[in-house]
Each structure stands twice: as C-alpha cells, then as structure tokens.
Image (cartoon, rainbow, N blue to C red):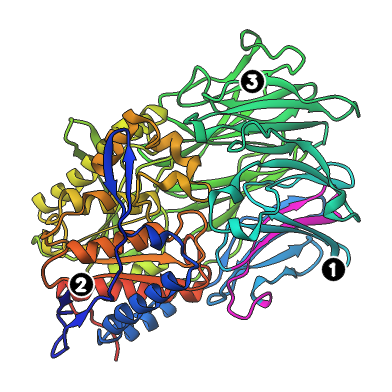
Amino acid sequence: MSLSPDLESGPSFQYPATACVDHVDDYHGTSVADPYRWLEHDTSPETEAWVAAQNVVTFAYLDRIPYRDRLKARLTELVNYPRLSAPTAKGPWRLFARNDGLQNQAVYYLQRDDMEPKVLLDPNTMSADGTTRVAGLTFDRHATRIAYMVSGAGSDWQQIRVMDVATLEDLPDRIDWVKVSGIAWYGEGFFYSRYPQPDVAAAAFSSMNEDHQVYYHALGTTQADDVLVYRDAEHPQRFHHVSTTDDERFAFLYISDRGQGRDGNALYAKDLQHAHANFTPIWTSFDDEITVLDNVDDLLLVMTSRAAPNRRVVLIDPAAPAESNWITILAERPEPLDSVRAAGRRIFASYLHDVTTRTFVHFLDGRLEREITLPGVGTVVGFDGARDATSVFFTFTSFTAPSTVYRYRIEDGSYAQYGNVTLPFDPSQFETRQVFVVSADGTRIPAFVVAKKGLVLDGNNPTLLYGYGGFNVSLPPGFSALRVAFLEQGGVYVQANLRGGNEYGEAWHQAGMKEKKQNVFDDFIAVAEWLIAHQYTCSERLAIQGGSNGGLLVGAIMTQRPTLARVALPSVGVLDMLRFHKFTIGWNWIADYGSSDDPVAFEYLYAYSPLHNLRDGVTYPATLITTGDHDDRVVPAHSFKFAARLQEAHVGDSPVLIRVETQSGHGSSSLTKSIHEAADVYAFLFHNFAVEPQLPV
C-alpha cells in the first residue's frame, strides 16, 4: 500500500509489508481474528525486523520536515534551566535532586545546614546513554544509610542498593527482581517486595509478574539469605508490600487484588515491639482504599475511602480494629481528598477544588489550624516529614509557573521559596483559562486552555487536546518547558479533565470505568467540539494526544470519530482491549477495564477496543504512534498490532506511522530522548497542520 508523505517534491513511499497469520480466538461464541498475533513476540527476529523497517519509513518522513532540527534546538534551549526537587529531611540531612538543565537524569545531593551540598548519586554516570534511573531513596531511622532503586532503559524492573551516608560508598547488598515495591526500614535491614527470578523462556509473558512476595533483608547478607515475610501462592496476581512507621513501632502489610477487579486493598498490622507477633487484620475487604499515615502512640492514623468515597482520615486501635470503633479525625468533604501527610505532629490535607489544590493544616485530633494561602491557583505536592519536624517542604506549579519549592514553618505557618528558578523564556506571555463543557449525557466537564495572551478566536489556531480519563488519576495544572515550543508558535494547549479520574472523587472515577468507559470518550469528544464551536480551532488544526490509558483514549476517538481531528498522537497506548491482561502486569488493570474473560465485559471491551474497531477504507487522521522497545508495562505489542492494522485499513494521503524508541520504556528514559521525541511529535503535528513554525535558522 503506497502513501504520499505530502512533503514538497518528495517521493511516495510504501509501508513495510506486514505478514498476516490465520489466527482466530473464540470469545464466548464470538470469533475474533488476530492476524498480527506474531507481533506480540516483541523480541523475535521477525518482530525486530518489522520494527526496524517501520522506523526506517518513519524517520525518513521526519527527516524531510525542514524545520525539525530547529524545533529540536529550540526545545533544548527551553529545558536548559536548573530544576530542584523538594528535599527529604532526616536527622541532620536534607536529600534532594537537581538537574542543572540538560542532564539526562537529575543528580541526588545531601546537605546539612553547615555545609555545601555534596553529590550522593549521579545516575548520568551509571550508563553510557544516560538511561539509568534512580528512585525510591529512603533513609534508615538514624539517617546513616540510604537504600535506593536502580532501573535501566525505562524498565519497571528495579534493583535495590544501599549506600553508607558517612562514606558515600555502596554497601555490597544487591536485591534483584524488584517491582511494585517500597523500602521499609526496620532495624539493620528493610522489607521489600519482589517476584521470583523467572525462567528466560518466560521473559516476555505475564508469568514473570506473578507470585508477588515480601521479604526482609538484613544488611551485610546476600539476597539468598533474605527471610520470606509473606507469600500467597493461591492468589498469584495479588500485590503485597510492607511499610513501617516513623518510629519503627509498627509494620503494615498491604494486599491488593486488582486482577480480580477489586479496586481497594486489605491491611494487616504487626507490632514490632513483640518479636514473635504476626500480622493481624485491620481491614480485609478489597473494595476500599485504606492507608496508614502514622501511629499516634498505640493508635493508627489512617486515610480511607470506606464509607467516604472522597476519602476521610480516621483513628484506629489495632487491638480493636472493628469499623464501629473507628474515630473520624477529618470527615469526608464534597471535594476529594487528593493527598494527606502526617508530619511535625500535624496533618496536611490537600483537596481538589475544580482540579486545583487547596491545602489545610490540622492538629492530630482533627482541629483546623489554618488553610495555607498558596502562591497561586495550581497544584501542590509534598509536606512529607518526620514526626518531630519543625518545617516541611512543598512544591507548587501551574501551567505558567515552573515547579518551585517552598519551605513551610510549622510553628507559625509562614513559608518561603527554597532555591531560585530562572527560566530561559518569559512564562507571563501565556495565560490559562478554565472552561466547562457539557458532555453527551449532560455532565459538566472541566478543561484548561493555555495559550498566548491576546489569542484571536478565528477558528484557525493549531490546537493540541490532551486527555487521560482513568485509574482514578487526576490531570491538575502542571508546567512543561517542552510545551512552550508549541505555545510560542501560536498553539493552544487544552487539558481535558475526563471522567475516570479523581478530579471529583470516586463517583467521577467510577463514571468512567468498565461498562461506563464510553463516557470518557464522549467527554473528550465534547471538549473537542466545544473548541471548534467556540472558534479556538477547526478539525484541520486539531491534534489529539494521550499516553498509556490516554493512548487508549486517542485510539478510541480515532475509530469512533476519524474526522474529528487532523492529527492523532497515541503514545504507549493500551490498544488491544481483549488481550491487555495477558502481558506483564496488565491483569492489574482489570479493576478499571474489566476483562474479556468475562462475557459481559467482553461485549463492551470489544465495542470500543481500538485495534478491533479500525475499518477498511476509512481515512484516519495523520497518526504518529509512539512506544518504547523496553516498555514492560504497556508492552509495545499493543502499538505494533495497532500500527499494522491501521496501515492496512487507512486510505488517503495522511501518513500513519509508528516511532519505536530504543532503550526506552513507558515513556522516554532520558532527557535527550524526551527532547528528540518532542521535536518529532511537534514537527509531525505542524507539518500535517500545514503550519510552518517561525524559528531561527
């Protein structure tokens, strides 16, 4: 099938040939063909050859866009400014991350009040291509050691290592096959979660992600000597992890059963003062969320959604944990409780009000001390700290304000900026407007519109509409220097807050999950149509974008409304809704999606599954599918199969391409790769809008 790339004086090209196999599955009496099943084997020589051939076509197209390199240069300029994380304080130390501007990974530093910061860990030195990442840095109780996790090439698999704070040297301890784990210090070691070491033959399949176990590792011993703390072989798809309180008095075992469609977690507690005590049940249902914030002497301060879909904070006696004995500390409010932290003998509770943060400080008995007057309307995260902390740090951001760290004094409620942020551009030239759109069933959907001040509503502005809509994840205001490259060219960025997220609490989440998933797509379509009706843009200047569950969103919109947008940008998307649970931890998403193994769920999944709803002879939007060869969360097979079927079905002159990043996983694994991908996406977008950006030569 040939296709003109629509580049001036450029030759037409052909998509790589994709073999079809005669494979048909029976779903509850319905036969479903899967001719590209072989592409699920992403490490086979045949699939690797197909990927290489697709990349040749894709990059040949991108290489011929004349301003692509200038876009890359501008993006590099825009991100070249120092960025600082909120410090974690423990004992005399503050631990923070800093990127000087163009470092592929942020560098971790240690600092005391009487000294200059010193480098703790520099991930940029751990690999030649800058794709090694460090995460989960956790002090032990006395701030003498730090355990941390290392991953490579964007993988979700991690290795735990331990560093001595005094010498800044790694100890010999190495813990492998770690995934979905915290690091919970207790005494001279820590609890962690891992999977069994897999057989090489199982490397690409979900059996690697079954039988999640909790272990205790004593420092100075080998992993083979670690003590098994908890295992449930009868339920291999459950997650298990352990946390400990600040004083190491209690350990808590959390168990979730999302593979069976359960969206909450069970909770068990162990009093570590008693060496032979077992984990005893606090809450055994999997239908509600329950998380321990800290202990208040013998009692537990807990955040829960039980009898409070928008969440509340309660006090539980582990010796008498019956729900009838719970004491409400912070009652449920009309706004969802987005995050809550216990630090400095206070409770910091942040709520979402029309998708922006309001933060309140309470005493441990629930009495309100004050509302924090934030630096602006935007998003706040942080307030982590020890029980004896006198100050805590938080980060504020908005669409036009970069992430900025502040230090909050608990005694008087004052706060001051911590570190300077100097940008290589002026964010004040842009403004944000929040609008509310009526969806198909009458539901009011919020969306943020970001553009240059003085935007002319002539129906012709290049517009990028972004969404997610799932897994109880909110899309609050957030800053992106890479996005500025689009905005300064007269682009309009729109972030839609769809059902399925947590913007308005659990009811909002449930209204966009399982059999109600179509609401999410209807919400997104309603926002797109509102933008067109109000003269922000037109279909020929509209691009739709989303990643992961948002990639599913874009794929569904493409198949349901192929003429709605000129450009579609599905990234690392879940696109085969009949087989997503067959790969890695895909079964974990059954709680949100349902499963094709269930005959009722099969009907609605099949009705919107992007892969299965592409139709021959349809002109689809210009499409750039992006994925990573090391994505072990949403395996690239989703994108591979969707691209193959799209190239087969599509007619017309618009390109439908797939870009496969090497040494990357569920998103770009380094800043360099992020810049390159953004340049390709914007070049593709502008070119298919027939808009040439004004950039220095």
Q: Mark 2 points at which residue?
A: 655
Q: Which of marks 3 and 1 is in front?
A: 3
Please name which of the two marks, 2 or 3, marks the residue nearer to the observer: 2
- Residue sitting at x 39%, y 73%: 51
Relative to residue 558, is residue 663 drawn left or right?
Answer: right
What is the number of the mark on residue 169? 1
Find residue 514 and report its horizontal and vertical position in percent. 35, 33
Question: Given the image, on which type of amino acid does mark 3 rest?
Answer: Trp
Q: Which amino acid does label 2 sit on?
A: Pro
- Picture quadrant of residue 74: bottom left
Q: What is the C-alpha distance between the residues marked 2 and 3?
A: 53 Å
Magenta stretch: give its range. 125-152
Q: Nearer the viewer, mark 2 or mark 1?
A: 2
Compared with residue 167, is residue 534 higher up or lower down, i.e. above or below? above
Q: Is 59 above or below relative to 194? A: below
Check if residue 143 falls in the magenta segment. Answer: yes
Q: Is residue 14 left or right of residue 192?
A: left
Q: Nearer the viewer, residue 283 or 444?
A: 283
Q: Earlier in the sequence, mark 2 or mark 1?
A: 1
Residue 283's label in the rendered image is 3
Q: Position of residue 337 (x, y in %)?
A: 49, 32
Comes first in the chain, label 3 or label 1: 1
The residue under the point 70% across, 43% down is 385
Secondary element at image label 2: loop
- Kindly indicate whether the residue at mark 1 contacts the one at mark 2 (C-beta within 8 angstroms): no
